[in-house]
Image (cartoon, rainbow, N blue to C red):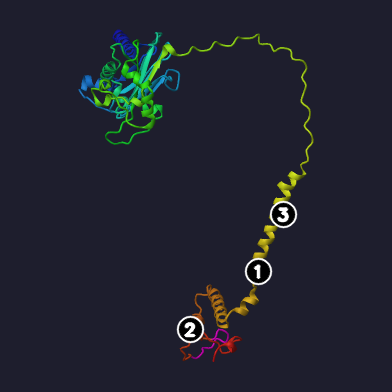
Amino acid sequence: MAGCRSWLLCLTVCAVSLLETNAEIKVTIPVGKLFTFELLRETFQNDFEPLSKLFAGRLYDDPVMFFKCNQKNFPDLPEWLRFTQRHPYDNGFLYGTPTAPGKTIIEIYAINKRSYEAARHILVIKATAEEMLPYQAEFFLKLREIEKVLPSSVQDEIKHDLQKLWDTEELEIINITNALDRGGRVPLPLAGHFEGVYVKVASKQYFSDCLLRVLTTEHEQQCTAGSKVKVPGECNFCSIPSNCITWCKTELFDLTKQATAPPAPPLGSGILEDGGDFNPPESPPSRDFFPDYIVTVIVPLILAIILCLLLAYIMFGRREGVTKRNAKTDQIQLYHHHTIHGNTDELRNMAGLRSSAPPLSTLPMFNSRTLDRAPLLRSDSPSIPLIMAQHDPYSDTLPR
């Protein structure tokens, strides 16, 4: 029984080691050549639920989100490598062009959005030194998107059209860049609007006559004026409309004519030459700061005082006062005003006494001082108030 358990443990360890070995992928790419690696969803589906396929026979089409691709022991990818995946149901792509020889280890983490299972793969990229092709050209494909260009079949279609334009079979794609990474604008989410892709190719053969038209003055004038560039019929080789290039964004690079870097300056001994004793500069002449003080302190203070005096005159000097206001006010209006104040005081005093009689101010006609009811007036004059008093100091001023 113990022997069976030991054999079972050995088989388990061997199976785990084989799985870990299969999870590590090694790729070799020359420096200056385009590297593309497609992350297939089927590969990660097999890592998520292998037992379900073997025993239960269940097959799932789960969305796989490649939420993390980074260089080992680093938080992000190297600067020459990019990752893209438009939708969780689409395959992901790692693409870029290595600029220096060396070994790069990429960690790829995937998560199953249905079961929240995670898988980890290791991609080892070994960049080898190789001589750069001398003649390079960069084209802009307006009707393309980066996810649709990275598959090898689409690259072959673009390469085939560019070979006809260059008039050579020795042509290689050395870089593909999304237009958004070059400062392009995000297109509208409508049919017929694309992000655009820059495709850079290189060859040992010199540029064709069609490509050399980009360097002519006539071509530059047409692009500067914004008019449509007139392309001869023999220079139009796009068999697929989406592979047609934008001529005004075409650039040619001749590495054979590039100026060599200037030589580095000679290194000295690192010891400064003797320049004599240090002579500190003389003290600056004295300066009178009193005018600056007057401008910055005294003048704003005087202005503030003037504004305060003006505000005080407006607020207090131009007020008419209570006596003057009462002298200008009609006696009937003053009587109504005093009556309203009296009624308000009466209601406040009755607020705490719920069992008291209703206030006299609610009666039709009454004298607020003698508490006697006044006789009803038979007059239609609007100048006579509704509330009259028989023995009131203001009653003498009322019309009879």
As for residue 167 lying within the magenta part, the answer is no
Foreground label between 1 and 2: 1
Q: Is the magenta stretch mostly helix, strand or loop?
A: loop
Find residue 182 and report its horizontal and vertical position in percent: 40, 27
**Callout 3 touching callout 1 (CB < 8 Å):** no
In the structure shown, which secondary structural element does the residue marked by tag 3 occupy?
helix
Find residue 80 and report its horizontal and vertical position in percent: 41, 19
Query: What residue sits 58% from the left and 85% below the top?
Result: 369
Which residue in the structure is indicated by mark 1? 318
Few, some or many C-alpha atoms within 10 Å of disc 3 (few <14, some 14-19, many ≥20)?
few
Which residue in the structure is indicated by mark 2? 363
144, above or below 97, in the image: below
Q: Distance between the residues labelled 1 and 2?
A: 42 Å
* Bounds of the magenta segment: 367-375
In the structure shown, which secondary structural element does the residue marked by tag 1 occupy?
loop
State the image quarter where residue 9 is shown: top left
In the structure shown, which secondary structural element does the residue marked by tag 2 occupy?
loop
As for residue 372 lying within the magenta part, the answer is yes
